[in-house]
Amino acid sequence: MTTQEVASKFYEYMQQGAFEKIYTELFSEDATSDETPGSDWAKAHGMKEIHEKGNKWREIVEEMFGATTASPVIAGDYFTCYMTMDFKPKGGPRTNMEEIGLFKVKNGKIVSEQFFY
């Protein structure tokens, strides 16, 4: 798949809340995931660690109220999406989070994701 095709599928699956499809169909097995500098989340290497990072995130969320993903913007081997989440972390106040996701595509698969918030 081209970067445009991967980005389009990513957007489609995000609209459906089909996160598992994103990771099983669109990501390379050796992909990396990197959070914004200074966050509490470490860099994950490979799908096993990316899934573990996702599980840790779900464990701290008490309630999700909604989320959005804007249409991707493509440039060469990269695409970005503006995303929001409205959630309540366990023991914390309701939070509205905005972030930019930067995704690199190689050989038809996402090989890295990086988040800025």
Image: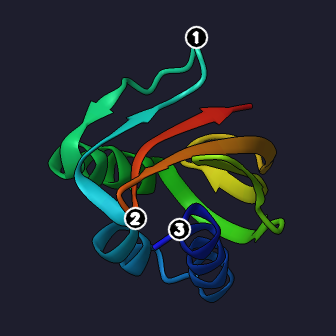
Q: Nearer the viewer, residue 116 or 66?
A: 116
Q: CA distance from mark 2 to mark 1?
A: 31 Å
Q: Residue at x 16, y 50 (%)?
A: 48
- Residue tagged by mark 2? 108
In front of the other: 20 or 27: 27
Whichever of labels 3 and 1 marks the residue nearer the N terminus, that label is 3
Q: Quadrant of the C terminus?
A: top right
Looking at numbered disc 3 in the image, what kind of residue is underneath it? Thr
* Crowdedness near tag 2: few (<14), some (14–19) or many (≥20) residues, C-alpha within 10 Å: some
Question: Which mark's residue is nearer the viewer, 3 or 1?
Answer: 3
Question: Which residue type carries mark 1?
Answer: Gly
Q: Quadrant of residue 97?
A: top right
Q: Are marks 2 and 1 in contact (CB under 8 Å)?
A: no
For marks 2 and 1 on the same chain, the one whose residue lies earlier in the sequence: 1
Viewed as shown, does residue 1 lie left or right of 80? left
| Marks 3 and 2, the one that precedes in the sequence | 3
Marks 3 & 1, CB-CB < 8 Å contact:
no
Query: x, y (%) of residue 12?
Result: 64, 84
Residue lying at 75% horizontally and 42% vertically, measured from the top left: 99
Numbered circle sitting on residue 38? 1
Up/down of 29 relative to 68, above or below: above
For image coordinates 67% across by 74% down, the residue present is: 11
Tell me if label 3 and label 2 are in contact, CB under 8 Å.
Answer: yes
Instruction: Assess disc 1: are there few (<14), some (14-19) or many (≥20) residues with their C-alpha within 10 Å of its C-alpha.
Output: few
Q: What's the mark number on residue 2?
A: 3
Looking at the rendered image, the disc whose residue lies closer to the viewer, 2 or 1, is 2
The N terminus appears in which quarter of the rendering?
bottom left
Disc 2 residue type (three-letter)? Gly
* Crowd band around label 3 with a 10 angstrom C-alpha radius: few (<14), some (14–19), many (20+): some
